[in-house]
Amino acid sequence: MKFSTRAMTCLPPALITLLVLTASCSIPPQARPADRNPLAPDPLSRQPASYYEAQLAELPLRIKSYDLTGVQRRQPVVVRELHVIHDDVRDEILVIDADHEANHMWSIDAYDFTLHWKTMIEKRVNYDPLPSGHYIHLMNSDGEYQGYDRVSSPREGESRLVSMGRFEGDIFPSAPPASNDTHVFVAATNSNSMRGLSMINNARGEGAETWTFPTVGAGVTEQFMQINLKPAADRETVAFVNNNNHLYMVDAQSGEFRANPDLRGNSRTPPTIKDDLVFVGSDSGQLFAWQKSGDSAWILTCDGLPYGDIFVEDRWVFVHTLELYDEEVATEDGKSTYLRAAVRPGKFCAYRYEIIDIENDRPVYNLIDGDPSTPWKVDPIWTLPDEGQQMLMIHDDRAYVLYEQREEFLNEREKAKLRDEGRIVRKEDELRTVSRQLRVLDLNTGNLLRPEWNLNLMDFAFVSGSMEERDRAIYLATKDGYIFKVYGKNKGVGGGK
């Protein structure tokens, strides 16, 4: 709509105002800032696999790849999640995609990269998949679950959904759940308890093997409070931290009480089970290794407060610590200041321990001192500044470490819109990746081994390490539908065929 200046001057002021408003309304909708999509669009085209393989070629590892799209489709399969599962049933890669407002879950063999099955799922959830014997469960923070057949022969084009609902109708998790090959373990907000839901007879968590801890006479004398950290589980034991500053270890099959050692403070580390030991940290500034009986294997005093996931492999222990400092804070009237205790990222620490076998007696656990010149404390073997790095794998005296920086970039209105569209389900969906690097370090010193072993992984949207002796590998996925595995020689069946 165009008007000459001369014609406009001849019109009444009220009519000029109306014409200006009408013209402004003709701006195309896509030009309005409010309609922008703050997330990067899903890929509509794709790179060849060789483009990504070239970026991994410098690693001293072999490479496998799997193309979710296959040879039939030109449009990429858009990857939303990558998960790697190791258990007694099989080792597999689980991929969740986005496909025309629907989601599928794929199961791919971790070694020969054959497809076990692909099934449509009801919806994505904000907790990791829970493998349990014949089933894979997806569960969200509302306690809703979907159970999928994991091991039966393929049924092309059919859903593998075998159950869905809410476990017993009253379980709202207070922390991410865990599982083993017989049970799903859920910290229940409703009753401040740990629930062991049986998957032995069906996929609905029902049966005589389902249990609740604590119960009357369970051996717990202290007040039992909420569980806010993910439990750790193997076939024998479930270990979890309660907000009463105790670590609890109970029988995974029955929920029977085993031990409840005092952590002497709040914990910021989900427990980890490895070598029949349970590892957990405490705000007492200590890192503990407990035997499943409740006996102490060793106690380590850290230079800071342990936090985050603890990585344990080959009797190496990697943990992040927070540094305590005095923060200057202004008073409410702004006329003066005072000091209060605060924390900030401190160090990324590498420790080692050994197990000494004693004939006709229990083994002895011993920490290795990284600096014998200070005999009054056990020092780490090496430390690095805490940059949020994540240990992915140990192999051939090399440590493969992921350095990743993410940031918040969405406002609450944008988050709500993207949740309605299904683009945001998990916390990591809300974050934007600023940098993603893989560094290969000397396991004994923490130093970068070669300049070229500092790889830019920004083209790989998902990176996951394997903390398993039989499968020393790093799994990667691109958003446009490729799965990669970089691996070395392993003692077990790992590493591919």
Image (cartoon, helix red, strand yellow):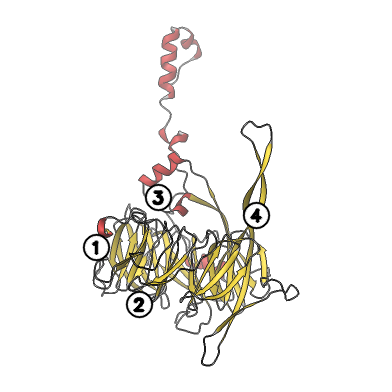
Determine whether, in the image, residue 25 is placed left or right of residue 349: left
Percent across and percent down for residue 195 are: 34, 64
List the residue tagged with mark 4. 324
Percent x, y of residue 224 = 41, 59
Question: On the picture, is 125 further left or further right than 385?
Answer: left
> Which residue lies under the disc numbered 1?
163
- What residue is rendered at 52% in x and 62% in y? 269
Q: Residues within 10 Å of mark 2 (few under 14, many from 20)?
A: some
Structural distance between the alpha carbons of marks 3 and 2: 32 Å
In the rendered image, the quadrant that contains the N terminus is top left
Which of the two discs, 3 and 4, labels the residue nearer the N terminus?
4
Residue type pointed to by label 3: Arg
SS under mark 1: strand
First in sequence: mark 1 vs mark 2: 2
Q: Residues within 10 Å of mark 3 (few under 14, many from 20)?
A: some
- Return the mark for residue 329: none
